[in-house]
Image (tube, grey):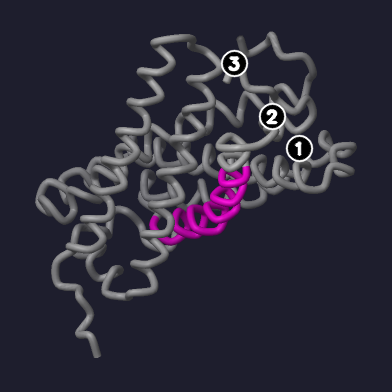
Amino acid sequence: MSGIRVNGRSGGRARPGGGFELAVWYLMRLTGLGLFVLALSHFLITHVLYDPANQNASFISDRWANLAVRTADWLMLAFVCFHAFMGLRTIVGDYTRGGLRTTLTMGLYLIAIVLFFMGTIAIIAVPNVLPAAA
Amino acid sequence: MLFRYRGSEGMLAWAFHRISGLAIWVFIVLHVFDIWLSGANPKLYDDLLVIYASPIGRVGEMLLGAALLYHALNGLRIVIMDFWPAMTRWHRQMWYASWAAFAVVGLPVAYFILKPIWGG
């Protein structure tokens, strides 16, 4: 990819012709819409409805005692690991060339995968949850 | 780089989208790490939360919320134009509408986040 075309009006990336880049283009919009709901409601709950001054590690495990909340949070993790890192990849693609671009892009993929696993471990292994399979 | 792109509102919408996206990315890296800490080292996580709930932490939290809200609203505007090209005609009006929604939603949220600083 040599320089990513931008839609002059929306400021969004112009729709690529096909293949991997087109799939990324669609997935950016799909995860974006998902995050519109997930991330905004998450922010509203954890920053407004519950003040951070009243939160601690057990606040999280209490929250995750609810399997639906845990599933939603994991979905948000998966979406954000794609959306945020593919977004950064667009920026890297715009401002760097050649070997530097390749290195930074691979670095982004690596951090995204590491974070995805760290977040997944946190969600699965959170203490005192495994809601009594009943 | 920022100003090489032609246009006015469209260019600003693009620049803000990029800057807010970058800022959110930085916080996401920190945030997934701190959530991992909440399981791996709950004591350290609780200490970190004290920083989040401090006055400086609250200002950062408000800025994060502003970046998130702008990015979400302008992202919606991009998606609308991508899948309904006729709306591109109204790209400027939609940008102003997103700022109106930003103010209506963002100002009360900012108030609730910052309130504890002055003991509310």
Dominant secondary structure (helix, strand or loop) of the stretch shown in magenta: helix
Chain letter of disc 3? A
Tell me which residue sits at (38%, 20%) in the image.
A104
- The residue segment tinted magenta is A26-46
- Residue at the spot of label 2: B13
Measuring from the top left, give residue B66's x and y in whole percent.
53, 40
Residue B107 visible (yes or no) = no
Residue A66 is marked as: none
Tell me which residue sits at (23%, 80%) in the image.
A131
Mark 1, secondary structure of its residue: helix
For badge 2, the amino acid type reads Ala
Residue B95 is marked as: 1
- Residue at the spot of label 3: A2
Q: Is residue B101 magenta?
A: no
Tell me which residue sits at (64%, 42%) in the image.
B75
| Left or right: where A16 falls relative to A85 | right
The image shows residue B90, relative to residue A39, as above or below, that is above
